[in-house]
Image (cartoon, rainbow, N blue to C red):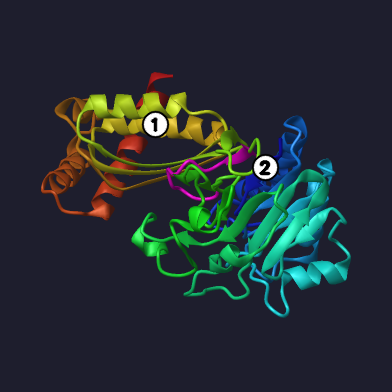
């Protein structure tokens, strides 16, 4: 009963420059660890092969070191790997793949599908029908020739492609590198392993996107998995099992605060996240001075606990209550300044300077009060 692991969109060489240096380096390293995890899973599930449906590399210009490290990471699984060029690492006349070959970095058990055609894995009963991208964008269906490919009668016909299934994915990615939605049926495929959509997604019972094994963007699309595919015999319905592979969980939240319970619920959700979280948080609405102090303390704790936390608060207005003002014990001219800044906030104007000034002044007054009580 042939069994294989389906993965795609490794995007090796991607730089995470928008993060702090330490966090970016950790996210890069996690992608190499993901390949090692794939090799381990292939062994544990006694897979006959690992199929990589495009975008192994993020760009043609990745370093020689990255190329060598990618292939080194595959050594945990001694069975065959079939790697397909995608739109980021298309099989150009001179490409990251030809460079890898010149470096002597490609192990003997790794098959590079640089040309359209069939790779027969004879001892394993698998025929891999390959549709590599030989340029970044195409406007014809490169999987159409699958219908004419002849394969041994007792071998599984497994398609390997990278692109957009027409009519079933969001419009913004449904223009180039098209794939017919009925390709598996039309080309008599037992399974069609796809890449390009970075989340795990089933198209039909024989057609799947595996998604990237390690999330790299803020999209809630079931990223961070690999698929174990088992087909009992040619023509049988595949049994597909999704297995988690990602180390880090990416969360992007857009929250509006209006009352204290909104803040309480937000902090409760933050506390429930694991240390492996990568969080992008944008806050809008209004918050009291006491609430602001609570929020800043919670964010400070979360920044130290999570892999990464970025919080944009420019859209969050300070709305001091009478109790807030009384607690500051601001009198005289300072009290007048606090009240003036408070009024500017209440007017509803997007006055970042007033908000920041009020926050700083409130902080200074709290520090003065704490020093006086010691």
**Other residues around mark 2 within 10 Å, as few (<14) / some (14–19) / many (≥20):** many
> Residue 89 location, x and y as percent?
64, 67
Q: Is residue 219 magenta?
A: yes
**Other residues around mark 1 within 10 Å, as few (<14) / some (14–19) / many (≥20):** few
Horizontal arrangement in the rendering, residue 116 relative to residue 201 (left or right): right
What residue is drawn where x is 38% and y is 23%? 268
Residue lying furthest front in this view? Answer: 153
Nearer to us in this view, 237 or 17: 237
Return the mark for residue 184: none
> Residue 223 location, x and y as percent?
52, 43
Q: Quadrant of residue 110?
A: bottom right
How far apart marks 2 and 1 lie (CA) works out to 58 Å
Return the mark for residue 367: 1
Return the mark for residue 5: 2
Tag nearer the camera, 2 or 1: 2
Horizontal arrangement in the rendering, residue 74 relative to residue 55 (left or right): right
Q: Is residue 188 above or below residue 282?
A: below
> Residue 243 location, x and y as percent?
60, 33
Residue 366 visible in image: no
Between disc 2 and disc 1, whose residue precedes?
Answer: 2
Q: Is residue 131 magenta?
A: no
SS assignment for the magenta stretch, majority:
loop
Residue lying furthest bottom in this view? Answer: 93
Secondary-structure class at tag 2: strand
Query: In which quadrant of the rendered image does the C terminus lie?
Result: top left
Horizontal arrangement in the rendering, residue 333 relative to residue 242 (left or right): left
Query: In which quadrant of the rendered image does the N terminus lie?
Result: top right
**First to last magenta residue range:** 216-230
What residue is drawn where x is 27% and y is 33%? 289
């Amino acid at each position: 009963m042939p069994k294989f692991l389906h993965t795609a969109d490794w995007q090796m060489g991607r730089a995470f420059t928008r993060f702090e240096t330490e966090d970016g380096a950790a996210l890069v390293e996690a992608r190499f660890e993901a390949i090692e995890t794939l090799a381990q899973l292939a062994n544990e599930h006694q897979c006959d092969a690992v199929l990589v449906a495009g975008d192994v590399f993020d760009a043609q210009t990745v370093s020689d070191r990255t190329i060598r490290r990618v292939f080194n990471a595959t050594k945990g699984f001694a069975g065959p790997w079939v790697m397909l060029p995608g739109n980021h690492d298309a099989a150009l006349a001179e490409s990251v793949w030809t460079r890898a070959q010149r470096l002597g970095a490609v192990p003997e058990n790794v098959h590079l599908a640089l040309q359209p055609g069939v790779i027969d894995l004879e001892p394993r009963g698998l025929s891999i029908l390959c549709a590599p991208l030989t340029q970044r964008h195409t406007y014809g269906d490169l999987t159409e020739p699958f219908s004419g490919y002849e394969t041994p009668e007792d071998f599984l016909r497994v398609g390997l492609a990278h692109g957009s299934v027409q009519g079933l994915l969001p419009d913004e990615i449904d223009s180039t590198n098209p794939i017919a939605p009925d390709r598996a049926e039309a080309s008599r495929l037992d399974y069609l392993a796809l890449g390009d959509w970075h989340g795990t997604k089933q198209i039909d019972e024989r057609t799947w996107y595996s998604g990237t094994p390690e999330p790299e963007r803020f999209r809630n699309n079931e990223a961070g998995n690999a698929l174990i595919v088992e087909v009992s015999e040619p023509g049988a319905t595949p049994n597909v099992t999704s297995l988690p592979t990602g180390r880090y969980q990416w969360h992007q939240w857009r929250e509006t605060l209006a009352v204290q319970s909104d803040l309480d619920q937000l902090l409760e959700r933050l506390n429930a996240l694991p240390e492996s979280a990568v969080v992008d948080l944008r806050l809008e609405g209004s918050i009291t001075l006491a609430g602001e102090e609570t929020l800043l303390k919670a964010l400070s704790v979360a920044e130290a606990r999570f892999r990464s936390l970025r919080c944009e608060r420019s859209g969050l207005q300070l709305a001091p209550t009478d109790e807030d003002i009384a607690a500051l014990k601001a009198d005289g001219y300072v009290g007048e300044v606090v009240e003036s800044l408070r009024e500017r906030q209440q007017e509803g104007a997007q006055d970042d300077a007033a908000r920041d000034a009020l926050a700083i002044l409130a902080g200074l007054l709290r520090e003065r009060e704490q020093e006086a009580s010691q």
